[in-house]
Amino acid sequence: SRMSKWWRLIPVLAAGCAGNKMDSDYLLDIQLAHEYYAKGKFEEAMRKYEDAIERNPKSYPGIVGLACADREWGLKKFAEAEDLFISKKPDLAKKEFDKAVNVHGSAQKLFKKAIDMNPSEPMAYRERGVFFYKRATSPFNFPYRLDDAKNRRMERDLAITDFELVVKRDPGALFTQRYLGLALFARGDSPKGRQHLESYLEGMAKAREYIRTTAPRQTPEQREDAEKRLSTLDKELMEVCDMLGGYLKELNDFKKKATDVADINSLAKEILAVENLLRKYHEATTPKSTDTPKQN
């Protein structure tokens, strides 16, 4: 997950919480919470973030971290509720659904608390944007039914507002550029969405080139790390490729059914633009002979 990047800021942000003494127990709680989160152990992460906040109630990274863990745990519960509902276990489904609703309510309050605490720091805006985006584009009937266009549109637009604020402050925020581009596509604003996905691709291509040619690789551990980073980066780029490919298929289907000349021409123009962007993504992820880091 690209979200892991911001955890590198924890020591700096922790030290910047005025009026609170940072002790080793607090920092250990934060570190353990991050490790649990990175492993997908969101319930354990939630507990450790709560411990950290208990030690330091004004811990910005603790509050944002707990909100993120709540977000992911709640999404997991929504998925479990869907499975139980399909399995014709409505009572159990409702229990999991209620758990998800409650924990997502807590997540929203925590994101707002963090933003009120430090309105100039983009982390909480970005992660709250992910919260709204994932809910709006959920492939399940939870938290909103798939045909509940009103609520899904509302949360998608809230995500776009948060992402746009972050990108305005920091155009180099690649993680946010990616999500903003995808959210704009979901809204049907392909031209703006393509701009942000172009920016994301440009930055990721530079990161890929750095890993390929410059990242330290003197030891086996460094070489393994470089290969993992390259694999993770390519996986994320391919996720965008899959989305663009699905959108392109929809456009071609619409074009086949269109009868108005203006609609056909408009669709043809959009298809060409998306094909060009998709080609750039495929080129960026095409294995090169130099992709395997050389040993120094």
Image: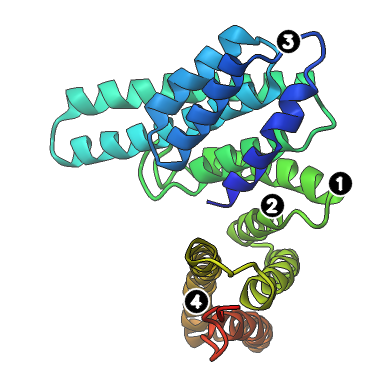
Reading the chain from its start, which is encountered first: label 1 or label 2? 1
Q: Residue at coordinates 82% horizontally, 56% vertically from top-left?
A: 171
Residue 214: percent from the left, percent from the top? 69, 73
Reading the chain from its start, which is encountered first: label 4 or label 3? 3
Reading the chain from its start, which is encountered first: label 1 or label 4? 1
Residue under label 3? 21
Q: Secondary structure at mark 4?
A: helix
Disc 1 residue type (three-letter): Arg
Disc 2 residue type (three-letter): Thr
Which of discs 4 and 3 lies nearer the camera? The answer is: 3
Residue 14: percent from the left, percent from the top? 72, 24
* Pick the front one: 243 or 51: 51
For label 2, the crowd category at 10 Å Cα-Cα, with few meaning under 14, some 14 to 19 and many 20 or more, is many
Q: Can the viewer see residue 260 in this picture?
A: no
Residue under label 4? 245
Disc 3 residue type (three-letter): Lys
* Pick the front one: 59 or 102: 59
Residue under label 1? 169
Quadrant of the rendered image containing residue 145:
top left
Residue under label 2? 176
Reading the chain from its start, which is encountered first: label 2 or label 4? 2
Disc 1 from disc 2: Cα separation:
11 Å
Disc 4 from disc 3: Cα separation:
51 Å
Is 103 drawn above or below residue 41 in the view shown?
Answer: above
Disc 1 from disc 4: Cα separation:
30 Å
Q: Residue at coordinates 66% horizontally, 54% vertically from top-left?
A: 175
For label 4, the crowd category at 10 Å Cα-Cα, with few meaning under 14, some 14 to 19 and many 20 or more, is some
Labels 2 & 4 near each other (Cβ < 8 A) = no
Q: Can the viewer see residue 227 in this picture?
A: yes
Disc 3 from disc 2: Cα separation:
32 Å
* Pick the front one: 65 or 24: 24
Q: Secondary structure at mark 2?
A: helix
